[in-house]
């Protein structure tokens, strides 16, 4: 199966929820490039899938998963195809609906936590995009939560409007539909009821809207957030230049 781009989606053998951030209009009248690619876990990739990444000039992968996740679901050796993998865990203790201790407070509250506990990971993403050759793919497990925050930060930095950022986030639920039949039985086996298990794959618009409000109220913008977590002005400029054309 060759790489097929349907809208922004990339069909890889085998990965889910893979799509670039290109083609979105910006406030400056430009358009986002396809340099940055978001994805769910790549542990299912075949050799052909790795070849497809290399054909798309993806030379760097940023993995937001924890050590335990990486050990459990190992990504095939991408170095054979000239692709380096940068490990940048957003958290080490599971903060998803599956791993959250006690009552899950909702994604908006958890995403606000990600901005704090994941500061080093998001700083690594900014710095990697600024310096890397070729395209950069970033991912977590489902490509929705940790990855969704990263995509929102990049799109906001590029000057994409909030409605479009929210729409990009909600597309995840549609693209993860093929995984539902696999994930829901597994979650039920772990003792989670149907509603909480289904929440793993949900991407409600209101959660990203609330996250963007939090970003504005606490930091002002993705650019100010990047500065607050230690990203240099030169790096911010370089990232914006790579993201827009």
Image: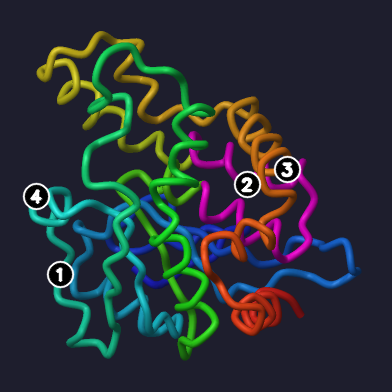
Between marks 1 and 3 in the image, the one whose residue lies nearer the viewer: 3
Q: Could you tell me which secondary element the residue under label 1 belongs to?
A: loop
- Disc 3 from disc 2: Cα separation: 19 Å
- Disc 1 from disc 4: Cα separation: 12 Å
- Disc 3 from disc 4: Cα separation: 36 Å
Please report the residue visible at 21 percent of the width from the left and 13 percent of the height from the top.
Answer: 192
Drawn side of residue 214 relative to residue 68, left or right: right
In the picture of the structure, the residue carrying the numbered disc 3 is: 216
Along the polypeptide, which appears first: circle 4 or circle 2? 4
Please report the residue visible at 52 percent of the width from the left and 71 percent of the height from the top.
Answer: 126
In the picture of the structure, the residue carrying the numbered disc 1 is: 76
Along the polypeptide, which appears first: circle 2 or circle 1? 1
Residue 205's quadrant in the figure?
top right
Between marks 3 and 2 in the image, the one whose residue lies nearer the viewer: 3
- Disc 1 from disc 3: Cα separation: 38 Å
Along the polypeptide, which appears first: circle 1 or circle 3? 1
Q: Is residue 157 magenta?
A: yes
The one of 53 and 133 positioned closer to us in this rendering = 133
In the picture of the structure, the residue carrying the numbered disc 2 is: 168
- Label 4: how many Cα within 10 Å (few below 14, some 14–19, many 20+): few
Between marks 1 and 4 in the image, the one whose residue lies nearer the viewer: 4
Give yes or no for contact between labels 2 and 1 (Cβ–Cβ under 8 Å): no
Along the polypeptide, which appears first: circle 3 or circle 2? 2
- Percent position (x, y) of residue 213? 71, 35
In the picture of the structure, the residue carrying the numbered disc 4 is: 72
In the rendered view, would you say 131 is above or below 210? below
The one of 12 and 68 positioned closer to us in this rendering = 68
- Percent position (x, y) of residue 104? 36, 17
Residue interval drawn in magenta: 149-174
Along the polypeptide, which appears first: circle 3 or circle 4? 4
């Amino acid at each position: 199966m060759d790489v097929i781009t349907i809208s922004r989606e990339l069909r890889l053998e085998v990965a889910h929820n893979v799509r670039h951030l290109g083609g979105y209009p910006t406030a400056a009248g430009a358009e986002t490039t396809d340099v940055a690619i978001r994805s769910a876990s790549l542990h299912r990739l075949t050799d052909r899938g790795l070849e497809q990444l290399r054909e798309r000039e993806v030379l760097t992968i940023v993995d937001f998963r924890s050590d335990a996740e990486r050990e459990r679901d190992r990504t095939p050796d991408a170095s054979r195809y000239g692709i380096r993998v940068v490990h940048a865990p957003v958290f080490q203790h599971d903060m998803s609906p599956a791993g959250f201790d006690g009552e899950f407070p909702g994604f908006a509250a958890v995403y606000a936590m990600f901005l704090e506990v994941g500061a080093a990971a998001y700083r690594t993403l900014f710095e990697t995009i600024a310096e890397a050759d070729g395209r950069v793919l970033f991912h977590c497990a489902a490509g929705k939560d940790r990855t969704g925050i990263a995509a929102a930060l990049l799109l906001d930095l590029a000057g994409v409007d909030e409605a479009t950022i929210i729409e990009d986030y909600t597309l995840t639920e549609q693209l993860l539909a093929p995984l539902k039949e696999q994930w829901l039985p597994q979650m039920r086996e772990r003792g989670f009821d149907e509603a909480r298990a289904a929440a793993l794959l949900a991407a409600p618009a209101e959660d990203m809207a609330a996250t963007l409000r939090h970003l504005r109220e606490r930091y002002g913008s993705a650019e100010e957030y990047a500065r607050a977590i230690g990203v240099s002005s030169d790096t911010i400029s370089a990232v914006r230049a790579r993201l827009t054309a």
